[in-house]
């Protein structure tokens, strides 16, 4: 492998219209990143595109193929374990659809590598509401969900459902990844809550979230239902659970 301390994990399902562009955008940055794509057997050939690009970017672009859709959370957990096995120090979550702007990756990296954060979040809501091209109803649902989670859990984060994140490896080493319960988008909430309970420093970096232009969103109202009801059970269970503390 070429030397870098940073891995960007990108889960995919039917992202043929975006995957090559997002990979090239990340690799065009001055900061040197590796990418791990985790594809859930996309019928549109997303994985084939990545395999072809691996010829152009050997030892920098990696692919994990899974037999079918098993949830966003399980995809990231598989990626986290792969990253730890390969000695990366900073591990990123990012969507394939350009809702997360690749040029914000260095800012998330800086927050952890230079400014002392253990977990940095690309936040839509830390400075107002920075969302472009979402229907107003969806903006309100997302914003209210994050406020609700903050109220119930006490986690001092404005964008608790954000999926644009940088972890120091120490955070992922401390969390028992096999005990993470949520498999869908509520996975994002559980990871932040667990990191907070373990005593890790979390910071938010303001970003602008832009709704996808190509492909189909995987978001639906059931995702928010999982977060709304599941977060109460998560909070209650935490009252009887001892979390490993940051060293």
Image: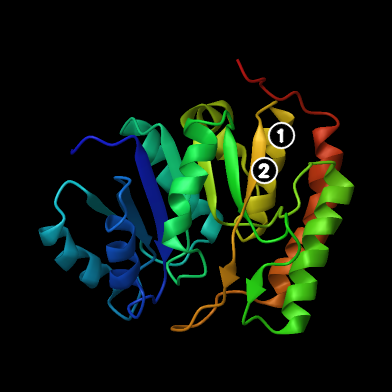
Q: Position of residue 100 (x, y in %)?
A: 50, 64
Q: Position of residue 212 (x, y in %)?
A: 51, 78
Quadrant of the drawing holding the C terminus:
top right
Left or right of 198 in this view: 77: left
Q: Using the image as rendered, state which of residue 108 and residue 13 is in the foreground.
A: 108
Name which quarter of the figure residue 236 lies in. top right
Judge whether residue 182 can be spotted in this image: no
Q: Secondary structure at mark 1?
A: helix
> What number of labels is visible?
2
- Residue occupying image coordinates x 16% and y 55%: 57
Left or right of 223 in this view: 54: left
Whole-Å distance between the Cαs marked 1 and 2?
6 Å
Q: Secondary structure at mark 2?
A: helix
Judge whether residue 154 can be spotted in this image: yes
- Residue occupying image coordinates x 67% and y 67%: 130
Residue identifier under label 2: 192
- Residue occupying image coordinates x 31% and y 71%: 21
Residue identifier under label 1: 196
Callout 1 touching callout 2 (CB < 8 Å): yes
Left or right of 78 in this view: 220: right
- Residue occupying image coordinates x 52% and y 35%: 112
> Circle 2: is it few (<14), some (14-19), or many (20+) Cα within 10 Å?
many
Q: Position of residue 104 (x, y in %)?
A: 48, 55
> Circle 1: is it few (<14), some (14-19), or many (20+) Cα within 10 Å?
many
Chosen colour scheme: rainbow
Name which quarter of the figure residue 162 lies in. bottom right
Quadrant of the drawing holding the N terminus:
top left
In this view, the residue farthest toward the left is 55
């Amino acid at each position: 492998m070429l030397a870098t301390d940073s891995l960007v994990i990108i889960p995919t399902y039917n992202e043929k219209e975006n995957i090559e562009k997002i990979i090239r955008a990340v690799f065009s940055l001055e900061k040197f990143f590796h990418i791990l794509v985790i594809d859930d057997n996309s019928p549109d050939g997303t994985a084939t595109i990545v395999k072809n690009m691996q010829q152009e970017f050997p030892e920098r672009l990696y692919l994990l193929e899974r037999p079918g859709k098993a949830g966003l959370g399980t995809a990231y957990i598989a990626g986290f374990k792969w990253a730890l096995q390969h000695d990366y120090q900073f591990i990123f979550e990012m969507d394939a659809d350009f809702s997360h702007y690749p040029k914000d990756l260095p800012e998330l990296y800086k927050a952890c590598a230079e400014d002392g954060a253990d977990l940095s979040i690309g936040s839509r809501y830390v400075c107002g509401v920075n969302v472009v091209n979402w229907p107003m109803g969806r903006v309100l649902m997302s914003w209210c969900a994050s406020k609700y989670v903050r109220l119930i859990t006490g986690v001092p984060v404005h964008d608790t459902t954000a999926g644009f994140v940088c972890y120091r490896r120490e955070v992922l080493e401390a969390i028992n990844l096999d005990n993470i319960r949520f498999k869908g988008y509520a996975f994002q909430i559980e990871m932040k809550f667990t990191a907070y309970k373990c005593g890790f420093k979390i910071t938010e970096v303001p970003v602008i979230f832009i709704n996808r232009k190509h492909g189909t969103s995987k978001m639906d109202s059931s995702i928010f239902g999982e977060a709304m009801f599941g977060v109460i059970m998560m909070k209650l269970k935490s009252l009887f659970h001892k979390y490993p503390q940051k060293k």
